[in-house]
Image (cartoon, rainbow, N blue to C red):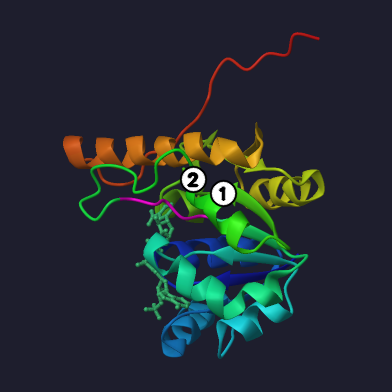
Amino acid sequence: MNIAIIGAGNVGRALAGASVRAGHIVTISSAHPENACTVADDVGAQAAASNSAAAAAADVVVLAILYGTIVDVLDEIGDGLRGKIVVDVTNPLTDDYSGLAVVGTSAAEQIQARVSGARVVKAFNTALAARQADPQIEGTQLDGFVAGDDADAKAVVLELVKSIGFRPIDAGPLAMARALEALALLNITLQIRNHWSWQSGWKLVGLTATA
Ligand SMILES: NC(=O)c1ccc[n+]([C@@H]2O[C@H](COP(=O)([O-])OP(=O)(O)OC[C@H]3O[C@@H](n4cnc5c(N)ncnc54)[C@H](OP(=O)(O)O)[C@@H]3O)[C@@H](O)[C@H]2O)c1
């Protein structure tokens, strides 16, 4: 796949590295282009001089930026996202990490509403950056939950999730991003309360089909 990653922080670096290792072509951009260059050099991706340039050549655009910067970035590149698959990795945390800053909706649904021509899919947000870089713990493959309303877009993202090492799980329509963002909040809360090392991840056990 031809993937643009907007943001070169913890998540941008982790997903860029994992995607390159999986054989994808990755272009990365960030607020400070030198940061995108550093990450691109480190992981074997390409750096773009702007978010628009990164998104232009990609089929899949990953938003690996803080929730608070989403509006600015979508104002900047929203027109260029028409028809593209947009992967929302954000968790809309309050400033003190005590809860979610959205009520009765999700970051993913808000993004979809702002870029109606794009096909927004929620993915990767339940995995901490360390696990995005390496979705296996002692041989256990973590779950990669994917939610979206466009079946074709979701199928592509499930394939992406699988390619970098997660067990892909179709979590349903984009509205299920509300649950996925809450699931991420729970993991973050547990890290803080228990002084854990930001390495754990979600795995649903006991999956059996009924028919
Ligand atoms: N960290 C995790 O374990 C984790 C796990 C799952 C989901 N998430 C979610 O993923 C998102 C990113 O988290 P993070 O930990 O990677 O954050 P981070 O380390 O703070 O990185 C944020 C990145 O956003 C970039 N950025 C800011 N404004 C931008 C703009 N206008 N255009 C392009 N790039 C811009 C920054 O660029 P510069 O580097 O140039 O300043 C930086 O690279 C958040 O929404 C978070 O909730 C995080």
- Residue 118 image point, x, y percent: 71, 62
Compared with residue 158, is residue 202 higher up or lower down, i.e. above or below?
above
Q: Where is residue 42 in the image (x, y as percent from the top left)?
A: 49, 78
Q: Residue at x 46, y 43 (%)?
A: 126
Pinpoint residue 101: horizontal percent, then vertical percent: 34, 49
**Residue at mark 1:** 109
Quadrant in which the C terminus is drawn = top right
Closer-to-camera residue (202/77):
77
Q: In which quarter of the image is the N terminus?
A: bottom right
Residue 45 visible in the shown view = no
Secondary element under disc 2, as helix, strand or loop, is loop
Mark 1 residue element = helix
User: Which residue is painted at 69% across and 53% down in the image?
Assistant: 160
64 magenta-colored: no
Which residues, given as a range, are shown in magenta?
89-93
Instruction: Say if residue 4 shows up in the picture.
Output: yes
Which residue is rendered at x = 68% and y = 46% of the image?
162
Mark 2 in CB contact with mark 1 (< 8 angstroms): yes
Q: Is residue 36 above or below residue 65?
A: below
Q: In this view, does 189 lie to the left or right of 181?
A: left
Residue 91 belongs to magenta span: yes
On the rendered structure, is 44 left or right of 66?
A: right
Quickly name the residue at label 2: 106
